[in-house]
């Protein structure tokens, strides 16, 4: 996916319909040995998908009614879910908390990883962009995009369950199993390997891939942090 243009006109958060339509993008999801043709219509996923759609519609309703409980203006002229904006005061921090609670009430607390879940990370990209140097502009671009569209993002940071006591490169070790870089070019990186526990991935727009533990320190080819559609 192309990075958002900072000079472009502001985008708006998904509506409920736009969210449901966005799931019909050819993603490959299997259940009980069969490939799912349309996530938004499949009995195993449709109720959750519709509940998420209600969350997106609630953003637009909040903005239309001028309540300001769920939404706040962005610096680019649009609006966003409050928790997707980095708080710069105690009042803004509390307002973000209240927006989380307002969404949770809509789902009666049954959607543990709603779209605001990963905002705990996405909202830091603007405040701490320099941490990601020399890719700080990528962080700033994603900070804007995540505010403007409020994408549903899941993460995959857990390694497949192999013998984790074995060092990278050891015979039978995790080198070929864990996600790692095999090649770097001016156009980007080539990655192979696997991740597990990507909660909500059947319904999300992007997967945030990263590592936990000592692996990236032991071998830099495991030091991956990226978002993939």
Image (cartoon, helix red, strand yellow):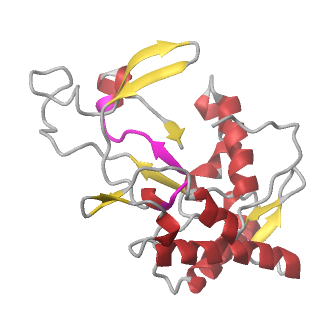
At 38% from the left edge and 53% from the top edge, which residue is drawn? 198
> Which one is in front, 51 or 180?
51
Q: Position of residue 103 (x, y in %)?
A: 62, 78
> Which one is in front, 35 or 215?
35
Q: Position of residue 188 (x, y in %)?
A: 54, 20
Q: Quadrant of the C terminus?
A: top right
Q: Where is residue 2 in the image (x, y as percent from the top left)?
A: 68, 34
| Residue 203 visible in the current orientation | yes
Q: Where is residue 45 in the image (x, y as percent from the top left)?
A: 43, 71
Q: In which quarter of the image is the N terminus?
A: top right
When the figure is inspected, residue 21 is found, relative to residue 143, above or below; the finding is below
When the figure is inspected, residue 196 is found, relative to residue 199, above or below; the finding is above
At 71% from the left edge and 77% from the top edge, which residue is drawn? 58
> Which one is in front, 160 or 48?
48
Question: For residue 197, what is the image quadrant?
Answer: bottom left
Count of marks, rendered view: 0
Magenta part of the chain: 203-215
Left or right side of 134 for 28: left
Question: For residue 139, what is the image quadrant?
Answer: top right
At 40% from the left edge and 26% from the top edge, which residue is drawn? 191
When the figure is inspected, residue 160 is found, relative to residue 113, above or below; the finding is above
Tell whether position 212 is magenta: yes
| Residue 86 visible in the current orientation | no
Left or right side of 84 for 31: left
Tell whether position 87 is magenta: no
């Amino acid at each position: 996916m192309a990075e958002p243009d900072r000079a472009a006109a502001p985008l708006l958060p998904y509506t409920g319909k736009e969210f449901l339509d966005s799931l019909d993008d050819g993603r490959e999801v299997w259940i009980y040995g069969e490939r799912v043709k349309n996530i938004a219509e499949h009995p195993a996923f449709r109720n959750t998908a519709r509940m998420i759609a209600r969350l997106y519609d609630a953003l637009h309703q909040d903005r239309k009614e001028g309540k300001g409980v769920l939404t706040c203006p962005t610096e680019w002229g649009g609006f966003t879910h409050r928790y997707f904006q980095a708080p710069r005061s105690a009042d803004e921090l509390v307002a973000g908390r209240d927006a989380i609670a307002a969404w949770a009430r809509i789902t009666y607390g049954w959607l543990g990883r709603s779209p605001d879940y990963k905002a705990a990370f996405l909202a830091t990209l603007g405040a701490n962009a320099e941490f990601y140097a020399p890719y700080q502009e990528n962080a700033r671009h994603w900070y804007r995009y995540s505010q403007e569209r409020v994408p549903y993002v899941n993460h995959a940071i857990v390694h497949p369950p192999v013998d984790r006591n074995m060092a990278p490169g050891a015979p039978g070790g995790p080198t070929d199993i864990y996600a790692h870089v095999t090649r770097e070019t001016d156009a980007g990186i080539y990655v192979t390997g696997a991740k597990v526990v990507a909660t909500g991935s059947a319904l999300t727009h992007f997967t945030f891939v990263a590592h936990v533990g000592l692996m990236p320190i032991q071998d830099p080819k495991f030091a991956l942090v990226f978002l993939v559609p």
